[in-house]
Image (cartoon, grey):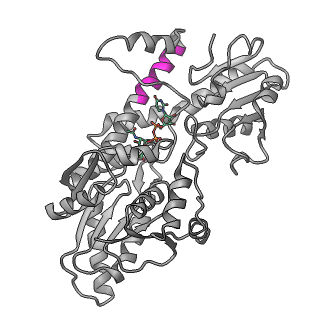
Amino acid sequence: MKSISVLGLGYIGLPTASIFATKGYKVSGIDISPSVVDTINSGKIHIKEPDLDVLVRAAVQSGNLKASLQLTPSDVFIIAVPTPFDVQADGSRKPDLRFVENAARSIAPHIVAGNLVILESTSPVGTTEKVKQWIEEECLKLKRGQINGVLYAHCPERILPGQMLKELVSNDRIAGGLTPEASEISKKLYESFCTAQIFITDARTAEMAKLTENAFRDVNIAFANELSLICDRLKINVWELIRLANRHPRVKILQPGPGVGGHCIAVDPWFIVDAAPKEARLLRVAREVNDSKPHHVVAQVKQAALGIAQPVIACLGLAFKANVDDLRESPSVEITAELAQSGLKVLAVEPHVEKLPSLLEGKVELTDLASALKRAHVIVLLVDHQAFGSLTLTQLAGKKIIDTRGTIKS
Ligand code: SAJ
């Protein structure tokens, strides 16, 4: 297996394509966006992630990575496209597999016996089987007949934004084939750059494992977020409470926050709930707890602003988590937007971006920390960025403070 096509050059596809290229594979990175293709071919990147620019430049300069709008034949096809969900009229969420289906169907004209098709996108259980069906269906439509001997596997990524390059190499992985041969060959492929262990299983278990990891984290964050609501009611400092409870040798409570953001943890548990709605009760409630947290923060801010004539609110942080510039599905953006929507004057401080996301443009003023602290009556700490790490209560004397991350020191 010498040539690889990676379909989707986003947060997962781009580092994966680049690392394979630096290991000597001939890699075609396929994306539907002409500007993404041009950016990568010029050795630059369209997303921010520590050291990714260096890796992509090396991959492109080696001549082994070329981005393109058009798929061509190759030995391996890796699908790394988004898998969002659709909200239904009754509030339930249905996985939206359109991008995976389009990617799979686009492979059909090029597929030949002996090729390996890997689904890396986080997907509901059964999607790898669907990828096979879509490709086979498309081959029949194209009058290519039945192409036998194609291998299929699910090899989910599990890298943490902010530490992707390190985790790409050092995290254990799972290779779940539709056949044992597909698992074995996938394992060998990832061994070219992954220095950790690669465990073999079937495709359905691999799909469920990825969803389970993120659902586990979601439930644990929901526990911390629910505790923070209980502590607000009972007038207990939740940060001190968690610190003390975590001194128990078998207790490890996560940290409450303004809600759960990003493209993964707030999405993936819904794929399990959708597949087993009667059984997945805890997972659904955890999602609801985490999704409701931003509204609780908004209510706290409004309460703090009561009685202040023309209150100015400073929202510190817009990213979905600390020390990243990613504003996708960020509860901080949601909170800031809701506050501005309710007519309050809102300043936003986000040292990792130069311009506001469209949702906030014209409604919120982006400013620096010093100016926000000077002008605001209410300070809402939303993201525990390093840049806010030295804030103290003494420094903020006279202001109302909502610290959703518990990082402002006394
Ligand atoms: N958060 C809290 N409290 C905590 C930990 C996190 O409120 O104690 C919040 C964060 O602020 C953020 C959200 O949760 O809004 C998610 O952040 P995260 O750092 O927990 O996870 P992600 O979304 O950046 O990456 C996750 C990781 N999954 C797990 O840790 C199980 C990563 O390994 C996956 O590869 C990634 O999802 C993915 O792509 O699925």
In the drawing, does residue 333 fall left or right of residue 370? left
At a point 45% along the width and 47% down the height, the residue shown is: 165
For residue 97, above or below residue 409: below
Residue 395 is situated, as x and y percent measured from the top left of the image, at 74, 14
In the drawing, does residue 161 fall left or right of residue 331? left
At a point 34% along the width and 81% down the height, the residue shown is: 110
Q: Point out the image quarter for the N terminus.
A: bottom left
Give the camera-side residue of 42 and 364: 42
Give the camera-side residue of 401 and 25: 25
At a point 30% along the width and 61% down the height, the residue shown is: 127
Give the camera-side residue of 57 and 161: 57
At a point 34% along the width and 35% down the height, the residue shown is: 216
Q: How many marks?
A: 0
Residue 291 is situated, as x and y percent measured from the top left of the image, at 50, 36
Residue at the extreme front: 62
Residue 113 among those drawn in magenta = no
Give the camera-side residue of 5 and 346: 5
For residue 195, above or below residue 86: above
Residue 224 is situated, as x and y percent measured from the top left of the image, at 44, 23
Residue at the extreme bottom: 143
Residue 396 is situated, as x and y percent measured from the top left of the image, at 74, 15
Which range of residues does the magenta coloring cover?
Answer: 221-232
Q: Does the magenta stretch mainly form a helix, a strand or a loop?
A: helix
- Quadrant of ligand 1: it is top left
Q: Point out the image quarter for the C terminus.
A: top right
